[in-house]
Image (cartoon, rainbow, N blue to C red):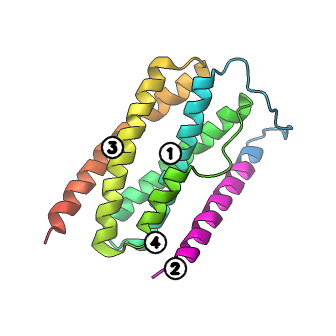
């Protein structure tokens, strides 16, 4: 069993590693190193900035939850789903990070408290209990994400952000469907 302090340290190390990896990847994509501007690009509304911040949090949370599932679960379906989530949300986060940088939108430095609390609540679980809670969390998170992306799809002011939303939304809808399928499998196979 992991101690609370150990898990908090693990989550902090994972977030740090992820942010460093994203930074290195962005630099290797031939992006020049520029001083961060405190002003937001003129073509980005405050609503678009708020969406980008929430989408960044959602991506980071999904990546961390998937990592945790890969470490804690022994269920093949859970691990396959977690691998897909980790890969797709990492790609979405990388593209969003580039978009934020291109539009001088400051990137969040820490995971939102709500997301951190959800991850922390999972640390005391293991086995089938963890698997079921992971699936339940994935269903809830992806329902929220799909709703948030659909709203942004209708309201985005920035054309690059609108393209990002249009590219990511089908994957989120697919994740939502697959998470419900996983939830159904797990509730049926572990109900006794």
Residue shown at 66% from the left, 44% from the top: 108
Percent x, y for residue 151? Answer: 43, 25
Percent x, y for residue 182? Answer: 27, 55
Q: Main secondary structure of the magenta part?
A: helix
Percent x, y for residue 163? Answer: 54, 24
Neighbour class for label 2 at 10 Å: few (<14), some, many (≥20)? Answer: few
The residue at the far left in this view is 192
Residue on which disc 4 sits: 71
Residue on which disc 2 sits: 3
For numbered disc 4, what is the local secondary structure? helix
Q: Which residues are magenta?
A: 1-24
For numbered disc 2, what is the local secondary structure? loop
Gap in angstroms between the C-alphas marked 2 and 1: 25 Å
Residue on which disc 1 sits: 58
Above or below 98: residue 58: below
User: Tag 4 or tag 3, which sits nearer the N-term?
Assistant: 4
Q: Is residue 31 rendered to the left or right of residue 153?
A: right
Q: Is residue 44 rendered to the left or right of residue 35?
A: left
């Amino acid at each position: 069993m992991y101690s609370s302090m150990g898990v908090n340290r693990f989550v902090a190390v994972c977030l740090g590693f992820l942010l460093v990896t994203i930074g290195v990847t962005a630099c290797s994509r031939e992006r020049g190193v520029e001083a961060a501007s405190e002003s937001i690009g003129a073509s980005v509304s405050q609503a678009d900035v708020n969406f980008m911040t929430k989408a960044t949090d959602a991506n980071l949370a999904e990546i961390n939850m998937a990592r945790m599932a890969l470490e804690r679960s022994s269920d093949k379906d859970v691990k396959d789903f977690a691998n897909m989530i980790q890969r797709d949300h990492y790609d979405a986060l990388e593209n969003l990070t580039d978009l934020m940088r291109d539009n001088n939108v400051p990137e969040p430095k820490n995971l939102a408290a709500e997301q951190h609390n959800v991850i922390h609540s999972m640390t005391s679980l293991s086995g089938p209990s963890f698997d079921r809670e992971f699936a339940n969390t994935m269903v809830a998170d992806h329902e929220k994400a799909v709703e948030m992306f659909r709203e942004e799809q209708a309201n985005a002011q920035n054309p690059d952000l609108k393209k990002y939303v249009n590219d990511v939304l089908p994957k989120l809808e697919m994740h939502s469907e697959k998470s419900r399928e996983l939830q159904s499998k797990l509730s049926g196979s572990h109900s006794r």
